[in-house]
Amino acid sequence: MSKQTRFSEKVAEGAAEVFLKENIGSEIFIGADIESLIAENAQVVYQNIDDPSFFGALVAYKSKQFVVLNTHQDLRARYYSAAHEMWHLALASAMFGEQSEVIKHSAAAPNFDSERAADHFAAALMLPQATVVKIWNKYVQNQEVPTKQVTKELVVRMANLAAMPYVAVCRRLSELGLPVQRTIVNWGKQRWQLYLEQSEFPPSPLDEAVRFEKFAGLSEFVKNQVDHKQMTLMAAANFLTHADPNQATQYLKQRKEKIDRLEVADD
């Protein structure tokens, strides 16, 4: 691990602990409530985008903040993405309380990796160290190194408790220095799905997507900015690329028509 990564993760780990104390009051699994926390500080935009590589984004314009979440992803991935975007949102606000300026100063360092920090913050926020270690110790009992079967069962149960991806839980356990077998840490999403199909665990709704769209607040905001000439048509189109692609296309069309009219006038 590079010094840059180590520094970024250390800042993010401390920031997650501060965030939980400031906004929750305790280091617990917050699960789906992460979206409610975001909604208290920004406009949440839900968009059903059939793109496996797009999970979410923070869009800021002047003093307004929008968090876009892709409901095409399963719930575990969506909540993890929300926690990732919470890092960026919290940095732009005072959600870290008295430590806000200290954390912002660290995040502004030249060797700081903001995206790696956001990923680590998401894991530390949704899987707080003290709670994870307590559950681990309770479940593995006196096994110094638990068997693979015990480890797999623990990962699934913890993932269900925290509403987190199995892969993220494995990585978090490993980062905390808990004795998780390397082969299990390296499992991807498909390998976990195969294991679950062969296990006695019942299907979890967290493994499914709840697809819907809700973005009226963002579209109306952009329209108001355009109508009052406080945002260009190109900026409006870029702003709505993921949240409201149909409206973004309309803004691009209007821009082209405007340019065409100007060219005709020049002739």
Image (tube, helix red, strand yellow):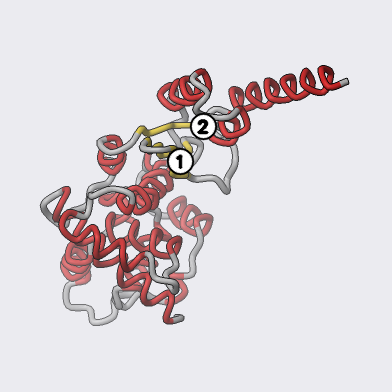
Residue type, label 1: Val
Name which of mark 2 and mark 1 comes first in the sequence.
Answer: 1
Residue type, label 2: Ala
Q: Nearer the viewer, residue 193 or 82?
A: 82
Camera-nearest label, 2 or 1:
1
Instruction: Please give the residue where the numbered disc 2 appears in the rendered image.
Output: 243
Q: Quadrant of the C terminus?
A: top right
Q: Position of residue 178 (x, y in %)?
A: 29, 76
Q: Where 48 sits versus 171, above or below?
A: above
Left or right: residue 218 versus residue 105 is right
Residue under the image location 20 percent in, 62 percent down:
17
Instruction: State the CA–CA distance, disc 2 to disc 1.
Output: 10 Å
Q: Nearer the viewer, residue 99 or 193?
A: 99
Left or right: residue 196 versus residue 142 is right
Q: Position of residue 12 (x, y in %)?
A: 31, 65
Tell me the quarter of the picture where residue 14 sits: bottom left
Mark 1 neighbour density, 10 Å: few (under 14) some (14–19) many (20 or more): many
Q: Quadrant of the N terminus?
A: bottom left
Residue under the image location 44 percent in, 67 percent down:
113
Q: Position of residue 34 (x, y in %)?
A: 28, 44
Instruction: Please give the residue where the numbered disc 1 appears in the rendered image.
Output: 59
